[in-house]
Amino acid sequence: MTLSLNRTISPLLIFLAFLSTASCHKAAQSPAFTVDNTWQCEVDGISYSGTIDTSFIQVHPGEHDTLITCNGTSADKKANIHFQFDISRSSNTGSSSPLGYLLFDTSSTHLLQTNYASNLFVTYQVEAFADGKLKASFSGAVMDLSAYNGPQHRITNGKFSCAAGQGDSEPKTFSFTGGNIASGGSQPVNGYFNNVRLLSNSLIMDGISNDGNKSLRLIAHTGGSLKTGTYSSKDGNASMQYFVPSIYADYVTDSLGDMTLTINTVTGNIVEGSFSGKDADGTAFTNGKFICRVKNYQPQADSLNKWLFCEDEYSFKYRIFGGNVLNATRSQSGSIYYLTINGESDNGSSHYSLSVSDYSLLTTGTYAIDESNSFNKFSYFHFTSPAVLRDGDSVSIKANYGPFYCRIDSLDDHKAVGILYGGISIYNYSTVSYIRTGRFRATF
């Protein structure tokens, strides 16, 4: 049995009412105590604190028969924390199962999580629960997911308390009806966002289902600032990636599936909208809704001249990068003619470079890097961004071997317009990825 909380129905920690009625008479006779719907902990001695947002339980057989899951937001609205652990309803206090789960998106770039394979876990201690109230403490160790085999961090002095009839209304939820293949068909999905940010002009919304087992990523290429509008995956401006271990039940890119994502309102750094469409297998997902607060939002003005490319690895990692063109030049060095375009995003921390060259005067048409790396066909394409991290490395995407193509659709003394597509190398490793949608517009 699962009891879940949907904030559209109530923002309250309703599951604790179930605990108070389903637990034994011993719990009901516990001394009165107070709670304040807050959490706090220290990570390597640095203090974090905030409020509890939503909670729910799953009841299952066994000694520890109740799985408690809840999430909270930091006081500065930049960090999110997710708790999950087992308790026994036959006792009102005591240690939980030692393999407690914790996911903590700190207010910096770090995403911390328990890792059982590395013997990194959090132990929860139930101090009291009765009359619809719960108090618990926790401590342990977590791994930094932003680095490959990342450093360990110690969690100490963790505490949280919550009560039915109270709770926070932090905007961080999503819901949709989608292709939950693992459950035998289309299923309603509800969850919360644990990490939302604007990177290289794309709004990236990462969320976790309320049962903690599934993940959702929505992407909308909004430009340098958040704005209302409808974004289409076919145009390379939207994506959905819904993971149900161990498959992607819904996966939409510029070349797979078809979806539209609409941002209905933008209030400061809070975004609310909807989404729907069909995934790569033609399965429909409907009634998608989301509301979230964008972390560390710094708006940037959009230029008339822009660049964009969508990159898709075979390992179901799809990304949309874009930004402004800073400058473009047409030049000649000896017998070689060049078109060079430089751009940026993330307020200058991400860099885009494109160069096309030939021994003939450049004109419209397709220029390619082939397997022999012929110089007179295409010089290079390169993108770097320290703001987007994978395995602890800053992003480095290159196309300096083939086949990779630049098609110039318009070229004169005033502007250059074209598209990019083909194979690229990524993260300075042997990982091969592909661009199927890439475009640029630049003026001289």
Image (cartoon, rainbow, N blue to C red):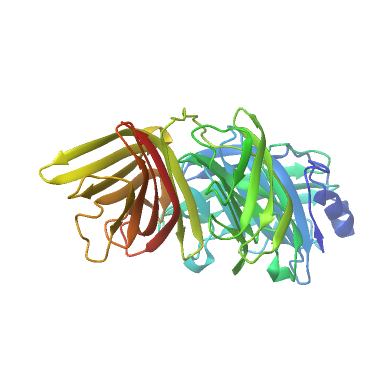
Residue ID at (20%, 60%): 374
- For the C terminus, the quadrant is top left
- For the N terminus, the quadrant is bottom right
* Figure label count: 0
Quarter residue 99 falls in:
bottom right
Q: In this view, does 330 lie to the left or right of 162?
A: left
Measured from the top left, where is residue 184 in percent x and y? 74, 71
**Is residue 225 among what the camera can see?**
yes
**Is residue 123 among what the camera can see?**
no
Residue ID at (22%, 43%): 338
Asked if residue 373 is positioned above or below residue 54 in the image, the reply reads below
Asked if residue 247 is positioned above or below residue 217 in the image, the reply reads below
In the image shown, does 417 or 37 lie closer to the viewer?
Answer: 417
Residue ID at (65%, 61%): 213
Quarter residue 295 falls in:
top right
Measured from the top left, where is residue 347 in percent x and y? 40, 32
Q: In this view, does 95 lie to the left or right of 314?
A: right
In the image shown, does 44 or 394 lie closer to the viewer?
Answer: 394
Measured from the top left, where is residue 286 in percent x and y? 74, 54
Q: Which residue lies furthest to the left in this view?
A: 334
Asked if residue 331 is positioned above or below residue 235 in the image, the reply reads above
Quarter residue 157 falls in:
top right
Q: In this view, does 278 lie to the left or right of 379?
A: right
Measured from the top left, where is residue 279 in percent x and y? 64, 61
In the image shown, does 131 or 103 lie closer to the viewer?
Answer: 103
